[in-house]
Image (cartoon, rainbow, N blue to C red):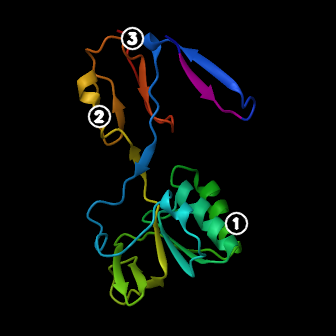
Amino acid sequence: MTIFFKILSSADTHSVAQIQPSAGMLATTRKTDPLAGLPGINDVPFMTNSDIMDIDIVPEHLIIIGGSYIGLEFAQMFKRFGSRVTVVEMAPKVIGREDDDVSAAVQEILENEGIEFKLSSNCIGLARRGDQVAVTASCEPGNEEILGSHILMAVGRKPNTDDLGLDKAGIETDAGGLILYPGLSPSHVNCVTHVSGLKCHLSLG
């Protein structure tokens, strides 16, 4: 039996790879991992990058918690749709993996489009205020709440592997990615990784 995987790329959108089961590959998606213990997270409705695609309105004021790639993509998108957009980020700069000059340039471009930023927000909390949602960005006295109509949580992703039964295959997992159990034969699994490419745990037997 041969397993067929369709591979899509900018160079060739019709490639098909044939992979024998002995060298099979299991590809999983990733899911949003909202900040654990975030004050008010259970009291305020929020959207993720998945369900925000289903809305049929333009939010009056979209507050995006998280200033990395996903958050900034939606910030620019909805600003151009006509929303007021505020990005709240815990770090002192956006897209923290990038060099400082790259982060600063991206922020400047988005600010020129009218997107607002609240960086170094080390005390984020959520609350209802009538028919609006409120986000606090700092615990300093006199800190003003950010009032908006909708919240998008863009605070990170984790492997969508909770129900794959990886323990039965001898694969241990952690919060950062998939870990190949040292005793697993390479005839079963050669490489376990996630799509971002940040980690690839390779067993050579």
Front one among 21 and 174: 21
- Labelled pair 2, 3 in contact (Cβ < 8 Å): no
Closest to the camera, between mark 3 and mark 1, is 3
Does residue 127 appear to the left or right of 199 in the view shown?
left
Q: What stretch is highlighted in magenta?
A: 3-9
- In the picture shown, does residue 82 fall above or below 31? below
Is 114 situated above or below 196? below
Tag count in the figure? 3
Q: Residue at x 51, y 34 (%)?
A: 197
Residue type (three-letter) at the residue carrying disc 2: Thr
- Image check: 193 left or right of 108? left
Residue 73 lies within the magenta run = no
Which quadrant of the structure image shows residue 44?
bottom left
Q: Nearer the viewer, residue 12 or 196?
A: 12
> Which tag, 1 or 2, sits closer to the chain's start?
1
> Mark number for residue 173?
2
Residue shown at 44% from the left, 44% from the top: 30
For residue 118, side relative to residue 99 (left or right): left
Residue 22 percent coordinates (x, y): 43, 10
> Residue 17 appears in which quarter of the rendering?
top right
Whole-Å distance between the Cαs marked 2 and 3? Answer: 19 Å
Q: How crowded is mark 3: few (under 14 residues within 10 Å), some or many (20 or more)?
A: few
Q: Helix, strand or loop at disc 2?
A: strand
Question: Residue 109 shows which numbered tag?
Answer: 1
**Label at residue 204:** 3
